[in-house]
Image: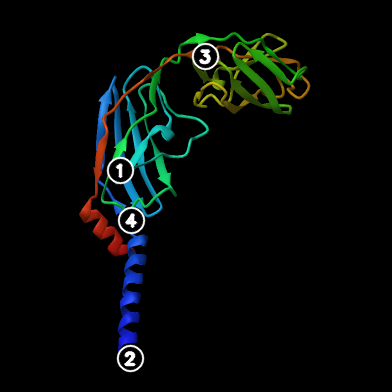
Amino acid sequence: MKNILFLGFSFFFTILCFGQKENDSIYYFNDILIGENSNVNLFAKNIVSKTSFAKFGCVIDNRSNKYVVVFEDKWEFNFGGNSFWPKKPEQGKVVAAFKKEMFTIESKDAANYLMKEFVLKPGGIFTFDPEGSYTEAEPFHLPAKQNKFIAGNFTLILKNIKKETDETIVKFECTYNGEKIAVISPSNAIIKTDDGKEWANAKSDVKPKVLQKGEKTSFILIWQIPGNIVDMQFAEMDIHWKNSFVETEMEELFFSNQTITIDKIKTAEKNKKDK
C-alpha cells in the first residue's frame, strides 16, 4: 500500500514539475521581414512568447518622404485559431520620413501563448503627409490672460507655467476634434518679446504628436533667454505657433499575414541556461 501511495505521489509530482517547467519556458521565434509597401519596410524581430504573453520588436524602416503611424492595437495575434490584440495605446507610434525605429508590440493575459507557431496579422499602419492643411492659431500672450483657446479643430488648455529670469516653461494640453488626422509639432512654436525678436523653442527635438478625433496630448515648450537681454519673469511675451497644428489625410498600408515559427535551437539553448 505504501509503495502504491509513493508511486502515485511521484507520478503527480513529476507531472506537476513538468507543468511548472513548461509554464516557465520562453519560446523564441525566427525574425522575419513582413514586407515592403510604398518604400516602407516592416520587420518583426526578437519575437518571444510565454504562457501569459507574446511580444516582438516592430521595426519600421521608413524610406519614404512621408510619416508613418502605427496603431499597435490593430495587430492581430492568432494562436491556434484564437485571435488576440494588444491593448489600445494612448497614441500611435510615429516614424518620421527617412527614419528607422523599433518599438514593442505585445498581447498578454488573454490566453496561453506558449505555442510553437502562430499567425501575425499586421494592421493599423498608415502613412500621411505632415505638410497638410495648416490651422492658424492666434498668438498666446504671457503672462496668460486666458487658460483655454480654440484654433480650428484644436482645443488647447494651459496646464502649467513657470517663469524665471532666464527661462520660461509652459505646458499645454491639446485635444483634436476634427475628422482627419492631426499632427502637432510643438517644436515649431517660437516666443516673441516686446522688442520684436523671436526665440526658438529650446525643445526643438520633440517629435510630432499624432491625434485622431477626440484624442488629446500634452506638450511642454521651453524658452531660454539670457537675463541680461530680457528678464522673462516679468516680460510681456507672445507665443507664435508657426504651423504647429496640421490636419491631414491618412492612407492605410497593407501587409501580408505571416506565420511565425519557433527557433528550436535558440529556444532550447535559452531555456537550458535559465534552469
Q: Is residue 167 left or right of residue 94?
A: right
Quarter of the image for the C terminus: give it: bottom left
Instruction: Give the secondary structure at mark 3.
Output: strand
Foreground: disc 4 or disc 3: 4
Mark 2 or mark 3: name the one nearer the start of the chain. 2
Q: Residue 190: where, in percent of width, then height?
A: 61, 16
Q: Name the residue under label 3.
A: 246
Q: Residue 216: where, in percent of width, then height?
A: 58, 26
| Mark 2 closeness class: few <14, some 14–19, many ≥20 residues within 10 Å | few
Front-most of 255 and 232? 255
Q: Residue 256: where, in percent of width, then height?
A: 26, 30
Instruction: Give the secondary structure at mark 2.
Output: loop
Instruction: Give the secondary structure at mark 1.
Output: loop
Q: In which quarter of the image is residue 57?
A: top left
3D distance between C-alphas at marks 1 and 2: 46 Å
| Disc on res. 81 | 1
Query: Residue at 32% across / 62% down in the picture?
Result: 22
Q: Residue 38: where, in percent of width, then height?
A: 29, 19
Report the amino acid beneath label 3.
Answer: Val
3D distance between C-alphas at marks 4 and 3: 44 Å
Foreground: disc 2 or disc 3: 2
Mark 1 or mark 3: name the one nearer the start of the chain. 1
Q: Can residue 139 be seen in this view?
A: yes
